[in-house]
Amino acid sequence: MTHVVTENCINCKHTDCVEVCPVDCFHEGPNFLVIDPESCIDCTLCVAECPVGAIYPEDDVPGGQEHFLAINAELAPQWPVIDRKKPALPDAKQWDGVPDKLKLLIREATG
């Protein structure tokens, strides 16, 4: 089983989760993080570290967020690994809990 980063991470991108990951399965895009399902060992450490509650076990992804399983799997190989905490996006607090953010997801890889 893997864990999945869901919509509430978009435009927040807190990175508390990456520091506790023992296998470096997080990948960073411009305004979102994803978990590589091939690397995730289902340790659950990241779930409690996410300040916006955006990480779920794949079997517990909230209804309407299931498409994030495919998004995480698609983008992880395209984006670089992130293994150190960075500051969240400047307006992260404003975006926490805002619905329908998928259209804001930037898919291009970070520099």
Image (spheres, grey):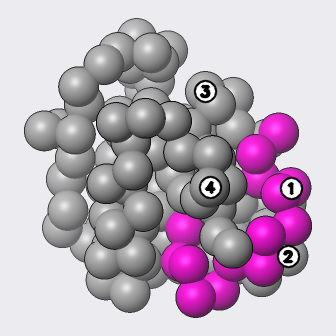
Q: Please rate how many residues cluster around mark 1, counting C-alpha atoms within 10 Å: few if below 14, some from 14 to 19, many from 20.
A: some
Of labels 3 and 2, earlier in sequence is: 2
Q: Residue at x 70, y 38 (%)?
A: 50
Quadrant of the rendering where the N terminus is positioned: bottom right
Q: CA distance from mark 2 to mark 4?
A: 21 Å
Q: Please rate how many residues cluster around mark 4, counting C-alpha atoms within 10 Å: few if below 14, some from 14 to 19, many from 20.
A: few
Location of mark 4 (residue): 59
> What label does residue 45 carry, if any?
1
In the picture, measured across the screen, residue 16 lies left or right of residue 102, that is right
Residue 68 visible, this orientation = yes
Q: Classify residue 49 by image quadrant.
A: top right
Contact flag, marks 2 and 1 (Cβ < 8 Å)? yes
- Give the amino acid at mark 2: Pro
- Give the dominant element type of the magenta stretch: helix, strand or loop: loop
Of labels 2 and 4, earlier in sequence is: 2
Location of mark 3 (residue): 52
In the picture, measured across the screen, residue 72 lies left or right of residue 67, that is right
